[in-house]
Every structure is written in C-alpha cells, then in structure tokens.
Image (spheres, grey):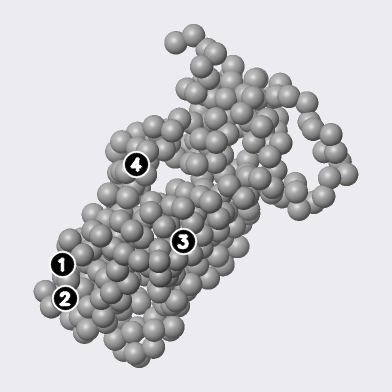
C-alpha cells in the first residue's frame, strides 16, 4: 500500500506497523508518474477497500450486531416500498425501482449487508491485513443480524399494510419455486456479482452523491429482475410467511436462502473481487509483504 495508507493505519495498529507500511518494498517496474490514470484509480479503490475491511473486522460484538440489524431493517424499507408499489400498480419493474429506497438507506446510513462483505473484508484478508477467522465472524454475525432485523421489520410492514399480502406471497413463492437447481444458482451468481460490483463502485469515490447511483441501479437489478440474493429473497419470503397464507414454510426458506448464499458468495468473490485484485497485483503483493500485526507470524506473540 502507499505511504498515505501507512499513516491512516496508525490509529488501528500503532505507529510500528504504519512505519513498516511506509517502508514497503520498492515500486515495481513500469509504475510511476507515467502510469495510466485508470490503474491509479483502481489502486486507490483497492486501498480504500482494504482499509475499510480492516475497520469492519476490528469492530466489537455490540457494534457488529447493531450494524447488521440496521442493515436488515434498511433493506426491509426497500421491501416495503416494493410491495406497496406493486400492490398499487401491479408493475414489477416499477416496484423493483422503488426497492432502491432500501439500498439508498443502506448507503447513506452506513449500515451493512452480509453480501456486501464479499469484497471489502475478503480484500483485507488476501492483503494480509486481517485474519480469516475475523472474516468468518463478520459473515456469520452480519448474516444472522440482517435476517433478524429484516424479519421484524417485514412483520410490521405486512401488519401495517394488509394490501401487500398478495404480492408478498407471490414474490416469496417466486424464489421458493426456483428450487435448488442451476437456474437458481445462476441467478445467485449474478446477484452476488451485482452486489459486489456495487460495493466496488461505491469505494471508487468519496462522493456520497455519486455512491447513490450504484445503490439505485443495483437495487433495481436485484429486485426488478428478481435476481437470487440471499437477504433480499429472505425478506420477501418472510413477508409472505407473515401473512399466514403462504404455501411454503421456514424449511423451504432455509433451503432457498442457503443455495442463494452459496451462489452469491462464489459470484461476488470469483467474478468481481478476485478479478479486481488481479488488475493491480503488485499492490496486493506490496501489502502482503507488510502484514498487520495480528497476521504477521514473524512477530513474537
């Protein structure tokens, strides 16, 4: 990482590690003032991504759980908008656009989805700036908290807006009917790739106004095209279950969401995260030569 990275890491890991990053290996040949602008932009995005990944995985339990809960609630506001618009208009594409409200909330409120963590913390682990066990903790807690927060909020939505019962059951049934097959998995791969691409695009800028653009487009793609996204489909299935008229149950939800999560994970990591890191492999190698203290096996314990 760059010298500025070292300076910003001082607050997290102390001055010693910051100095090591500042003293990182020589820049590879061909890199310098004349390097292409787009490569520099990718490097800057990767730098912000790794720093954010370390921050996320260093959070305490209370902050981690709270962030996951509000992430589920924020996306459930998009589900509320989607179901109400569909109930009023019968237009699924318009309803999908309304769902973007949830991703705008997710962006502006700085909450977090389980599926957003296929880029940021994975990059930090590959760059040896955090540990694999911290990634597992982040994934498990965030996913569980997303689902709990979303379950509660969708219950309130269905109770407060009884007119959404029909689209709620139909939307949930769509994902249940996909089953455990290649079509469902393909849609899950696309869902994981799309949400991870959104995360990358949002980390490519520091402008909050610009970050809203991928939030809107991604929300529309996920809901309007009914891609198989583990959290979104779970909240829609929960909405149908809350009506007590759904022809499916929680076991059906668990199978559907689990298959979707696997596809999301592979799609997000393989189709976006790893390929983005391969755009600037020298930056990953440079970071790996100066690992964080928690992953540096050369340091005395």
CA distance for labels 2 and 4:
32 Å
Picture coordinates of residue 96, whole percent (x, y) = 42, 77
Dot 2 surroundings within 10 Å: few (below 14), some, or many (20 or more)?
some
Residue ranking furthest to the bottom: 89
Q: Are marks 1 and 4 in contact (CB under 8 Å)?
A: no
Report the residue marked by disc 2: 246
Task: Check disc 4 and report its element: helix, strand or loop.
Answer: helix
The mark nearer the N terminus, 2 or 4, is: 4
The reply to whether dot 4 and dot 3 touch (C-beta < 8 Å) is no
How crowded is the residue under tag 3: few (<14 C-alpha within 10 Å), some, or many (20+)? many
Q: Quadrant of the C terminus?
A: top left
* Sequence order check, earlier mark of 3 and 1: 3
Foreground mark, 3 or 2, reads 3
Residue 64: assigned label: 4
Give the percent coordinates (x, y) of residue 145. 28, 50
Element at label 3: helix
Give the distance between the C-alpha atoms of the residues marked 2 and 1, in whole angstroms: 7 Å
Q: Quadrant of the N terminus?
A: top right
Identify the residue shown where x is 27% and y is 49%.
144
User: Of the residues tagged 4 and 3, which is closer to the observer?
Assistant: 3
User: Where is mark 1, residue-wise?
Assistant: 249
**Between 150 and 228, which is closer to the camera in this rendering?**
228
Q: Earlier in the sequence, mark 1 or mark 4?
A: 4
At a point 55% along the width and 55% down the height, the residue shown is 271
> Which one is in front, 195 or 158?
195
Kindly identify the residue that appears in the image at 82 percent across and 50 percent down.
36
Q: Which residue, given by chain and number where applicable, does mark 3 sit on?
A: 189
Q: Is residue 221 above or below residue 286?
A: below
Quadrant in the rendering for residue 126:
top right
């Amino acid at each position: 990482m760059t010298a500025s990275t070292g300076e910003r890491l001082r607050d997290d890991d102390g001055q010693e590690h910051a100095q090591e990053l500042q003293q990182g290996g020589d820049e590879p040949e061909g890199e310098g003032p004349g390097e292409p602008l787009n490569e520099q932009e990718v490097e800057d995005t990767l730098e912000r991504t790794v720093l954010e990944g370390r921050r996320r995985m260093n959070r305490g339990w209370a902050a981690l759980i709270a962030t996951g809960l509000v992430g589920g609630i924020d996306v459930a506001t998009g589900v509320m908008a989607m179901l109400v618009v569909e109930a009023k208009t019968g237009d699924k594409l318009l309803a999908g656009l309304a769902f973007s409200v949830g991703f705008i909330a997710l962006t502006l409120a700085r909450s977090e989805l389980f599926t957003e963590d296929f880029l940021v913390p994975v990059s930090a682990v590959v760059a040896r700036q955090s540990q694999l066990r911290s990634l597992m903790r982040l994934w498990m807690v965030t996913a569980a908290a997303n689902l709990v927060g979303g379950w509660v909020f969708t219950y309130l939505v269905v109770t407060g807006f009884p007119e959404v019962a029909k689209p709620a059951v139909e939307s949930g049934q769509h994902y249940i009917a996909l089953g455990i097959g290649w079509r469902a998995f393909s849609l899950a791969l696309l869902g994981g790739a799309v949400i991870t691409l959104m995360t990358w695009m949002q980390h490519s800028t520091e402008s909050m106004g610009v970050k809203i653009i991928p939030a809107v487009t991604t929300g529309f793609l996920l809901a309007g095209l009914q891609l198989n996204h583990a959290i979104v489909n779970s909240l829609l299935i929960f909405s149908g279950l809350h009506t007590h008229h759904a022809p499916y149950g929680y076991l059906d939800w668990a199978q559907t969401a689990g298959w979707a999560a696997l596809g999301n994970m592979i799609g997000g990591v393989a189709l976006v995260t790893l390929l983005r890191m391969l755009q600037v492999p020298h930056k990953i190698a440079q970071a790996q030569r100066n690992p964080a203290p928690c992953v540096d096996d050369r340091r005395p314990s």
